[in-house]
Image: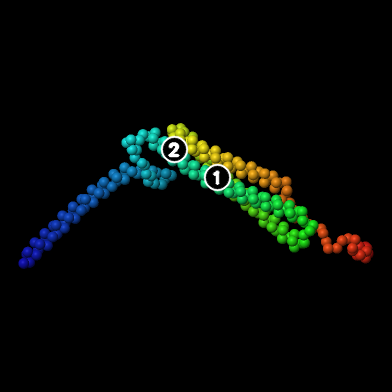
């Protein structure tokens, strides 16, 4: 009986070893195939000393390199069109806010100058503080518009390059679409820039941004009402 158990145990060990060897061989074959699969779709590039995996699309059999370049140039023009659209919207909004801030300051300053003789010291101080706040808003809005204008100019230049690249690659429709988007964006911005220039001209003429605080010289007692005793020098 004991001998039978030893034979059965030995047969079990042999079967387990066989299964382990078979699994090990299959795993080895899978691991050997894996680098081959990876190499088909990925290339390892070294950029400034760092390694990064960049996917390369295999060229389909029915497409030439010219076709792929043409398709890629169309994708670039789509991206630059979106960039131009977003920066144009941001620039127009910032220009609108800047013009409104200027117009509010000019009107407020004019009202302040026209009514200075009728204001009490408390009223005059309150209005002047509002003017100072409006001046700061003009400064902030001007800063915002210049920042978005810089982004917009970058988008315009990129779109021009993309349109030229698409034309050279044979993607005529993509090039025409990009140029059309450029013309629309530039026309809209030009209109708003004219409004801005008019507002800045009014701001300069009114001197509302740089004028000093006016002094209210009106008093509750006129000179002729002051008794001679207070006017006589001792």
Q: Which residue is mark 2?
A: 73
Q: Is residue 82 above or below residue 18?
A: above
For the point 66% across and 50% down, the residue is: 102
Q: Badge 1 local density, few (<14 within 10 Å), some, or many (20+)?
A: many
Picture quadrant where residue 153 is located: top right
Question: How many numbered circles does the render carry?
Answer: 2
Q: Badge 2 local density, few (<14 within 10 Å), some, or many (20+)?
A: many
Per the model, the C-alpha gap separating discs 2 and 1 is: 22 Å
Q: Look at the image and tell me whether residue 166 can be seen.
A: no
Q: Is residue 140 left or right of residue 12?
A: right
Q: Look at the image and tell me whether residue 130 can be seen.
A: yes
Q: Is residue 72 above or below residue 25?
A: above
Q: How far from the left and from the top, in percent, is residue 159?
A: 50, 39
Mark linked to residue 88: 1
Q: Observer-nearest residue: 138 or 41? A: 138
> What colour scheme has been applied to the protein in the rendered image?
rainbow
Q: Is residue 58 left or right of residue 205?
A: left
Helix, strand or loop at label 1? It is: helix
Q: Is residue 105 left or right of residue 180?
A: right
Helix, strand or loop at label 2? It is: helix
Q: How far from the left and from the top, in percent, is residue 149?
A: 58, 45
For the point 39% across and 37% down, the residue is: 68
Q: Earlier in the sequence, mark 2 or mark 1?
A: 2
Q: Is residue 164 left or right of residue 63?
A: right
- Please name which of the two marks, 2 or 1, marks the residue nearer to the observer: 1
Q: How far from the left and from the top, in percent, is residue 182?
A: 53, 39
Picture quadrant where residue 187 is located: top right
Is label 2 in contact with label 1 (beta carbons under 8 Å)?
no
Q: Is residue 212 above or below residue 201?
A: below
For the point 73% across and 46% down, the residue is: 205
Q: How far from the left and from the top, in percent, is residue 74?
A: 44, 38
For the point 23% across and 51% down, the residue is: 27
């Amino acid at each position: 009986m004991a001998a039978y158990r030893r034979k059965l145990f030995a047969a079990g060990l042999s079967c387990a070893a066989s299964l382990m060897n078979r699994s090990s061989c299959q795993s080895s074959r899978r691991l050997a195939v894996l680098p081959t699969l990876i190499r088909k779709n990925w290339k390892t590039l070294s950029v400034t000393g760092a390694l990064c995996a960049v996917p390369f699309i295999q060229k389909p059999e029915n497409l030439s390199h010219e076709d792929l370049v043409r398709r890629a140039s169309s994708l670039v023009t789509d991206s630059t069109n979106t960039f131009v659209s977003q920066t144009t919207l941001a620039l127009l909004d910032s220009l609108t806010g800047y013009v409104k801030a200027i117009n509010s300051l000019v009107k407020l300053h004019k009202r302040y100058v026209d009514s200075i003789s009728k204001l009490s010291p408390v009223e005059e101080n309150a209005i002047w503080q509002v003017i100072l706040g409006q001046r700061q808003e003009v400064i902030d809005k001007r800063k915002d518009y210049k920042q978005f204008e810089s982004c917009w100019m970058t988008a315009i230049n990129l779109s021009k390059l993309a349109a030229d690249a698409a034309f050279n690659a044979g993607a005529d429709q993509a090039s025409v679409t990009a140029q059309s988007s450029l013309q629309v964006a530039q026309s809209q911005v030009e209109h708003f820039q004219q409004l801005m220039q008019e507002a800045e001209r009014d701001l300069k003429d009114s001197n509302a941004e740089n004028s000093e605080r006016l002094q209210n010289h009106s008093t509750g007692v006129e000179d002729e009402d002051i008794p001679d005793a207070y006017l006589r020098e001792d």
